[in-house]
Image (cartoon, grey):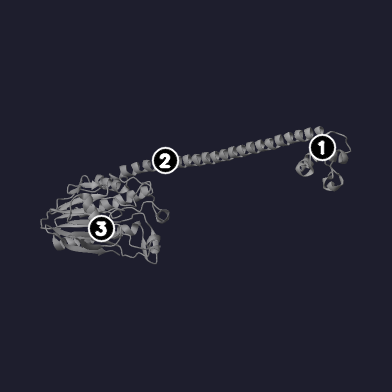
């Protein structure tokens, strides 16, 4: 028989029920002995007189209840975890719905603004054709050379006034007047017969960056109107001094309708300006717009049987690899490639191909040029061309 006294550690705990005591001590059965030993211990401590069968069954019953409770706790935890996952998924869907709703509202706002701008643009363009450019007598000039004017990076609408430079629409108009006077003087020197005006892109400032939007005095619609009027007047005055004035156009990067990542290649506002200029001067007999564009950003100009290719320069680098890549894309080698974009006049040559770059009407002094430490005076490029190619370069600096 089991002797009770050595098992003092099996005393009943305060507040412990019979079943709890039986279940706790039964865990040490292998140390205590048989179920008869266990019954002797329980009867002595609990003051009972039950057989070993009674305690064995009570323990087994309690064990089943305990297992069931533990299982239910596990089930409850699984259900809770599942519920929490469901809650998190609901919150995620709620956030997703809110973001989609905000994006939808934003797009509706953008579409409404775009529609409003298009309505305004339609009104403005309708009025542009009513500008009174009177017809004039034919100009009688005959010579062995023509003039090429690279009219690049006007950035109409941009406004800045810093230690490095100053620019606004009024200054742009004055500098175009200076350029026109230089052209007339150079034309008299060479007796140039025809004039080719290459609109080299970035005619307006646009609004592709936040920093540009801040420095714009006029919105894009007003910029288009002003640029059209200035270029129309410029070409009209040229038509009084040359037998024929030809104009061509390539698109720049500042006239993208959308941001760079969303922009469509052929959607550039330079094309609208070129079309509006043509509309304004359609009744002037010696003014013509060349329709030889290979692409929105590439124009083909033939001067005295020499091929000049005009690009803006944002997609074609002003270096050897840029020239080679463009020639490979074209499938032929032109006499010269005309550039803009970098805001400084330059002349170079790569493998026999002339590289001629126009300047900028704005010069430097805006936030971008200051931060990038870019310098350059306001300038435009004029070339005198004969059957052998360019015979004289005139990089004209403007005040």
Quarter of the image with the C terminus is bottom left
Q: Which mark is residue 36?
A: 1
User: Which mark is first along the chain, 2 or 3?
Assistant: 2
Asked whether disc 3 touches disc 2, contact meaning CB atoms under 8 Å apart, the reply is: no
Q: Is residue 90 left or right of residue 187?
A: right
Query: Is residue 131 among the parts visible in the rendering?
Result: no
CA distance separating discs 3 and 2 = 41 Å
Q: Is residue 162 left or right of residue 343?
A: right
Q: Which residue is mark 2?
A: 111
Q: Quadrant of residue 324?
A: bottom left
Query: Is residue 298 among the parts visible in the rendering?
Result: yes
Circle 2: is it few (<14), some (14-19), or many (20+) Cα within 10 Å? few
Q: Which residue is mark 3?
A: 321
CA distance separating discs 2 and 1 = 90 Å
Residue furthest to the bottom: 163
Q: Give SS at disc 2.
A: helix
Q: Quadrant of residue 29?
A: top right
Residue 316 coordinates in the image, percent (x, y): 27, 55
Residue furthest to the right: 47
Residue 192 coordinates in the image, percent (x, y): 14, 58
Circle 1: is it few (<14), some (14-19), or many (20+) Cα within 10 Å? some
């Amino acid at each position: 028989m089991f002797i009770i006294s050595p098992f003092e550690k099996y005393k009943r705990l305060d507040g412990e029920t019979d079943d709890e005591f039986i279940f706790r001590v039964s865990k040490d059965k292998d140390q205590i002995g048989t179920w008869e030993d266990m019954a002797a211990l329980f009867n002595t401590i609990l003051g009972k007189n039950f057989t070993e069968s009674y305690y064995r069954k009570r323990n087994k019953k309690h064990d089943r209840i305990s297992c069931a409770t533990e299982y239910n706790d596990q089930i409850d935890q699984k259900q809770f975890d599942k519920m929490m996952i469901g809650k998190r998924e609901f919150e995620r869907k709620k956030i997703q719905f809110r973001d989609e709703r905000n994006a939808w509202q934003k797009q509706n706002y953008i579409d409404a603004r775009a529609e409003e701008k298009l309505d305004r643009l339609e009104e403005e363009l309708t009025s542009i054709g009513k500008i009174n450019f009177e017809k004039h007598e034919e100009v009688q000039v005959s010579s062995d050379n023509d003039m090429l004017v690279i009219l690049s990076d006007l950035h109409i609408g941009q406004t800045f006034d810093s230690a490095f430079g100053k620019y606004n629409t009024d200054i742009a108009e004055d500098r175009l007047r200076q350029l026109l006077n230089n052209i007339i003087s150079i034309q008299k020197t060479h007796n140039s017969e025809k004039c080719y005006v290459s609109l080299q892109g970035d005619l307006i400032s646009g609004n592709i960056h936040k920093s540009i939007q801040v420095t714009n005095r006029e919105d894009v619609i007003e910029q288009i109107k002003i640029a059209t009027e200035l270029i129309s007047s410029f070409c009209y005055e040229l038509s009084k001094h040359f037998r024929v004035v030809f104009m061509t156009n390539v698109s720049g990067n500042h006239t993208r309708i959308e941001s760079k990542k969303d922009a469509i290649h052929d959607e550039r506002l330079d094309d609208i300006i070129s079309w509006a200029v043509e509309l304004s001067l359609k009744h002037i007999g010696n003014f013509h717009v060349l329709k030889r564009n290979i692409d929105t950003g590439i124009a083909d100009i033939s001067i005295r049987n020499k091929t000049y290719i005009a690009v803006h320069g944002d997609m074609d680098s002003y270096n050897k690899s840029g020239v080679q890549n463009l020639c490979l894309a074209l499938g032929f080698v032109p006499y010269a490639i005309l550039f803009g974009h970098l805001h400084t006049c330059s002349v170079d040559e790569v493998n026999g191909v002339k590289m001629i770059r126009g300047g900028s009407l704005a010069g430097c002094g805006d936030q971008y040029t200051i931060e990038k430490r870019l310098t350059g005076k306001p300038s435009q490029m004029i070339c005198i061309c004969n059957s052998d190619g360019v015979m004289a370069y005139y990089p004209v600096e403007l005040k």
